[in-house]
Image (cartoon, rainbow, N blue to C red):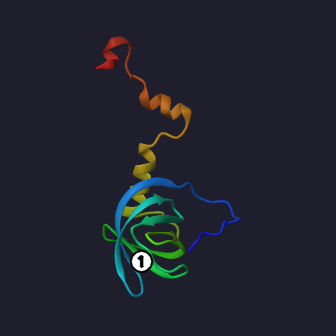
Amino acid sequence: MTRSPDPRPRQHKRTPVDIEVTVNGVLNLVEGTISDLSEGGARIDGASMPARSRCEIHYAGQIVYAVVMWSEFDRMGVRFPYELTSGPLFNALERARGALPSSPAQIFMHSRATGFGRRGLS
């Protein structure tokens, strides 16, 4: 199935991640990898369910409910009816965002020495 362009802009910044999850649908239970995550949804590789179906994403003891928005042979995009605000999946998103400097100033601060002279380069 091909995706139709969504005229609405995204509300949340998508972040690249590599999170192994189990997806529980009405008729099947499949393993997949979240490769793109935000507070409002995710792209899951290695798993596919029919568009508009409902599913549960299981990760580290947490269950996150989702609706399949688009689906291809080996991946799908899901929307969370309730935004991620806490729990293991939200914590993984926050860790991933913290690991990626996003602005030029953050990149500079992340890569520069913190001390004075040669002593700061140890």
In the image, what residue occupies the spot 46% across and 48% down?
97
- The N terminus, quarter of image: bottom right
From where the camera sits, is residue 115 visible?
A: yes
Up the image or down, 89 lies above or below 50; here it is above
User: Nearest the camera: 119 or 70?
Assistant: 70
Is residue 81 shown to the viewer in this render?
Answer: no
The residue located at (55%, 37%) in the rendering is 103
Assess disc 1: are there few (<14), some (14-19) or many (≥20) residues with their C-alpha within 10 Å of its C-alpha.
some
Mark 1 — residue? Answer: 56
Q: Measured from the top left, where is residue 117 in percent x and y?
A: 37, 12
Which residue is situated farthest in the bottom direction here? 27
The amino acid sitting under disc 1 is: Glu
Residue 62 appears in which quarter of the rendering?
A: bottom left
Left/right of residue 87 with respect to residue 7 in the rendered view? left
On the image, the x and y values in percent for residue 32 come to: 37, 68
Question: Viewed as shown, does residue 103 lie left or right of 113?
Answer: right
113 in relation to 64, above or below: above
Q: Residue at position x 52%, y 67% from top?
A: 83
